[in-house]
Image: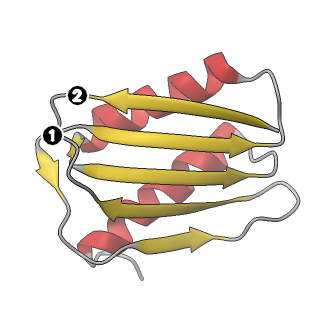
């Protein structure tokens, strides 16, 4: 297992809904917990993954996510069992949309 931590500053979009969990930890999937948190305007992301050695890919996916949403005062925790970058992006977008009330 590997734990990766990212922090993105200068977000502009604050979420005010209660914490949400999307996805299911299982073979080739992940779960995402997203919650408001007092982080001085930052977005903090902690990833626990079974796929060791993919830090640069995770960083690219997290930077892309932050560029899309510009979250502020948000904590995200990810438990991963080998999801592909596309699935990671989908689940993270789903988590934000759930918080915003836009999820199906």
Horizontal arrangement in the rendering, residue 70 relative to residue 81 (left or right): left
Q: Residues within 10 Å of mark 1 (few under 14, many from 20)?
A: some
Q: In terms of sequence position, does the residue under pointer 2 or pointer 1 come before the other?
A: 2
The mark found on residue 41 in the picture is 1
Element assignment for label 2: loop
In the picture, residue 11 is in which quadrant?
A: top left
- Say which quarter of the image contains residue 93: bottom left
User: Residue extending furthest bottom?
Assistant: 104
Image mark for residue 33: none
Give how far apart the Cα atoms at labels 2 and 1 are.
6 Å
Q: Secondary structure at mark 1?
A: loop
Above or below 57: residue 98: below
Tell me the residue that label 2 is attached to: 9
Q: Residue shown at 41%/27% (left/top)?
A: 63
Quadrant of the rendered image containing residue 16: bottom left
Residue 43 in picture, x, y percent from top left: 30, 41
The residue closer to the viewer here, 4 or 32, is 4
Neighbourhood count class around disc 2 (C-alpha, 10 Å): few under 14, some 14–19, many 20 upward: some
Instruction: Tell me how many marks there are.
Output: 2
- Residue 38 in percent (x, y) is at 20, 52
The reply to whether callout 2 and callout 1 are in contact (CB within 8 Å) is yes
Q: Is residue 87 left or right of residue 83?
A: left
Q: In the displayed structure, would residue 16 be above or below residue 8?
A: below
Q: Residue visible at 53% across and 42% down?
A: 46
Q: Quadrant of the N terminus?
A: top right
| Residue farthest top in this picture | 56
Where is the C terminus found, in terms of image quarters?
bottom left
Looking at the image, the residue that sits furthest to the right is 27
* Residue at x 52%, y 22% (from the top left corner): 60
Give the image location of residue 65, x and y in percent: 40, 38
Q: Position of residue 75 (x, y in %)?
A: 37, 51
Q: Is residue 76 left or right of residue 16?
A: right
């Amino acid at each position: 297992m590997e734990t990766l931590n990212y922090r993105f500053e200068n977000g502009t979009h604050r979420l005010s809904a209660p914490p949400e969990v999307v996805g299911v930890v299982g073979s080739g999937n992940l779960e995402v917990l997203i919650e408001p948190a007092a982080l001085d305007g930052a977005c903090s992301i902690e990833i626990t993954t079974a796929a060791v050695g993919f830090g640069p890919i995770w960083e690219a996916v997290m930077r892309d996510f932050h560029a899309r949403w510009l979250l502020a005062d948000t904590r995200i925790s990810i438990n991963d069992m080998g999801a592909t970058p596309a699935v990671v992006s989908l689940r993270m977008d789903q988590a934000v949309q759930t918080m915003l009330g836009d999820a199906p």
